[in-house]
Amino acid sequence: MNKGVLIIGAGGVGRVVAHKCAKNLDTFEHVTLASRTKSKCDMIAKEILDMQGIKIDTYSVDADSVEELIKLLETVKPRVVINVALPYQDLTIMDACVACKIDYLDTANYEHPDEAKFEYKLQWERDGKFKDAGITALLGSGFDPGVTGVFCAYAQQNIFDEIHYIDIMDCNAGDHGYKFATNFNPEINLREVSANGRYWENGQWIETKPLEIRVDWDYPEVGVKPSYLLYHEELESLSKNIKGLKRIRFFMTFGDSYIQHMNCLQNVGMLGIKPVMHNGVEIVPIEFLKTLLPDPASLGPRTKGVTNIGCVMEGIKDGKKKTIYIYNICDHQEAYKEVCAQCVSYTTGVPAVIGAKLLYNKTWDRDGVYNIEEFEAKPFMDELMTQGLPWKIIEL
Ligand code: NDP
């Protein structure tokens, strides 16, 4: 039987996942980290050896190639693959997992490099292949998507008779001291924020202009923050999986400086994803911008403050209206002390490890492709309490 966990992607999130898998060695038995640039894997491996005294294996892999991935899977023979490379690699990694019959997990839905389109279609279409292979694909096991879906599932399974309205609230009240930087991969982040907004109401999708809808919401333990409606991928699966739902929206906080910079970059074409010619060389503007911006991994030591991410849910319990907020507070400096990364990577990496743990020990065991809210939420909620992302529920 295969043994151990294989992490693909040695960026900000991959680093947290590797640290946390090593901390959960009693479950995972063995940890391997592979990515395009092996030196990044080796740097993380050294960090883990120095901080925890645990040795992990490292490999280089081009995760755009199914063949290379299959070779790696045949060498490492893991029981679960955690995909924390980029959303562009989801399909190739899923296909390699099917070929080798190994459980798969990711934290972001597939995106095509040339098209900013966020949808699960191509991943859901692989359901039959995963069923035939007798393995599980757990989609969206980060924070959002991820823990937000678990919060919704937990509320549906334990708190409400029916949930009617959900607002997912994502607040990063941390300060890194730069005028402009993105907390995770700039290309993925800026594509998401500069796209049209969209939310689901009464069975229909309603489109808004980028950042058109703003609410000033009073986040518990943080205070009032301007929050903007964005489309976010978990809306697609939650609108299908939460029964009786009438509306679901997603809001994220942005400071004025971030918005001014982003608007300016957009107006001059720097967020473009199509190649342009520059001095006889083809460049993709957003990729060039990524080169100029601070590496998200470098924000860790400088970021202070907390994140507050959660779900406001309104519904019915025993015939009475009920509104709650389920949320987590994560402290940037505490996260950095533990795993050398700030909260945005921490809040994504820890849930990926929890999802992998539940697959590894077969607490979650269903053949096919599933979003996280389709599983029983309680075991995941229990793990959040002990793995560094404790949650609270308040009545509003
Ligand atoms: P980074 O850009 O920091 O890291 C991505 C890593 O993937 C890099 O190490 C990169 O390698 C590697 N990689 C890219 N292409 C390939 C390839 N073809 N083959 C092998 N490795 C490759 O991103 P993050 O760590 O910030 O994000 C990781 C994932 O987490 C993304 O999919 C992101 O969308 C998702 N995410 C999810 C969130 C959630 O809450 N659900 C929140 C934040 C992020 P190299 O170092 O050589 O470039």
Image: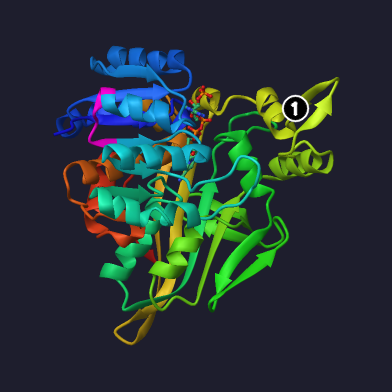
Q: Amino acid at mark 1?
A: Ile
Q: Quadrant of residue 325?
A: bottom left
Give me the residue at 70% from left, 34% from top: 286
Is residue 13 in the magenta section? no
Q: Which residues are magenta?
A: 75-80
Q: Quadrant of the N terminus?
A: top left
Indicate whether 230 appears above or below 86: below
Q: Nearer the viewer, residue 280 or 221?
A: 280
Q: At numbered mark 1, what does the secondary structure look like: helix, strand or loop?
A: strand
Q: Quadrant of the C terminus?
A: bottom left
In the picture, measured across the screen, residue 314 lies left or right of residue 119, that is left
Position in image of residue 358 (x %, y %): 22, 46
Number of marks in the rendered image: 1
Q: Answer yes or no: is residue 18 visible.
A: no
Give me the residue at 35% from left, 43% from top: 105
Give me the residue at 41% from left, 45% from top: 142
Is residue 78 in the magenta section? yes
* Residue with the mark numbered 1: 283
For disc 1, the neighbor class at 10 Å (few under 14, some 14 to 19, many from 20) is some
Position in image of residue 361 (x %, y %): 16, 43
Position in image of residue 150 (x %, y %): 34, 57
Q: Answer yes or no: is residue 230 visible.
A: yes
Q: Quadrant of residue 374?
A: bottom left
Position in image of residue 23 (x %, y %): 24, 28
Indicate whether 209 appears above or below 301: below
Q: Nearer the viewer, residue 221 or 370?
A: 370
Indicate whether 319 appears above or below 111: below
